[in-house]
Image (cartoon, rainbow, N blue to C red):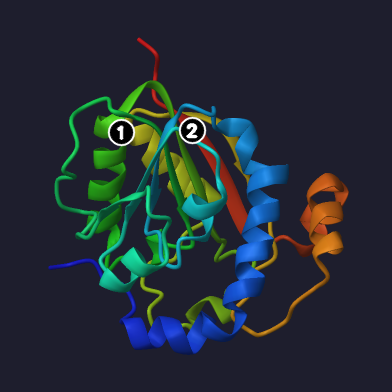
Amino acid sequence: MNESNPPAEQYRLRFAANKEYRNRVWRILCEDFFQQFIAPDAAVLDLGAGWGEFITNIRCGRKLAMDLNSDTAHNIPSEAEFLNQDCSQRWPLHDATLDVVFTSNFLEHLPDKRHIEAAVAEAFRCLKPGGLIICLGPNVKFVPGAYWDFWDHYVPITENSLAELLRMTGFGIERCTPRFLPYTMSDGRQPPLLFIRLYLKLKICWPLFGKQFLIVARKPAA
């Protein structure tokens, strides 16, 4: 069974109107937060890259994007390598070739836990010793009803359940934040970009407004 990515038309209906704003938001998220985890020469894979906002805006030495939706190829920078495949199948990469695997709002779209386990195992295989996996996603504990308002949400995930899977796979958890970012940008709201910069700096706001978890885990160096 293949992973269950939303079809291209479903993505367009949900996000197209906000495309430029989303890209600006991700530019801030990368510059002001996620860049701290990624060296300028790092090899980075954006798992479930979707519209390509992360891999477009992050600074790194080698960019890779994986998605089952072929439209992703049109949304990522020309220098990025596009892997158009089911992420639960073996990735076309050698062992220990990546420095960072990043995934945002993706794992809950896979059809079941077995597919998530397989994708995480492939991330572990392909990461170099000491490499990082960074996971961002809606925390079902804080959006219990709204989580299911998206037809393509299949697996309920919390920060603790995903952290447990990462530990079982062999990762060490370095950061596990149950409340990080607000829930979604698919509802059309566009807060001023200045507010987003302030929000990232004011961590006291995260427990009040955050409904997405953030997990940073490392493959052992030895």
At 31% across and 65% down in the image, what residue appears?
A: 110
- SS for callout 2: strand
In which quadrant is the N terminus drawn?
bottom left
In this view, 190 is above or below 22: below
Q: Which residue lies under the disc numbered 1?
A: 124
Residue occupying the point 67% across, 85% down: 188
Measure the C-alpha gap from mark 1 to mark 2.
10 Å
Q: Let me know if residue 46 appears in the view.
A: yes
**Amino acid on which disc 2 is placed:** Ala
175 relative position to 163: left or right:
right
Query: How busy is the neighbourhood of tag 1: few (under 14 within 10 Å), some, or many (20 plus)?
Result: many
> Does the image show residue 145?
no
Q: Position of residue 221 (x, y in %)?
A: 39, 14
Point out residue 179 in the picture as x, y percentages from the top left corner. Answer: 69, 54
Task: Tell me which label, 1 or 2, sits earlier in the chain.
Answer: 1
Question: Where residue 38 is drawn, which disc sits there?
Answer: none
Q: Which residue is mark 2?
A: 217
Whether residue 188 is situated above or below residue 87 in the rendered picture:
below
Q: Is residue 107 left or right of residue 36?
A: left
In the rendered image, the residue lying farthest to the top is 222
- For disc 2, the neighbor class at 10 Å (few under 14, some 14 to 19, many from 20) is many
Residue type at mark 1: give it: Phe
Q: How many marks?
A: 2
Circle 1 — which element? helix
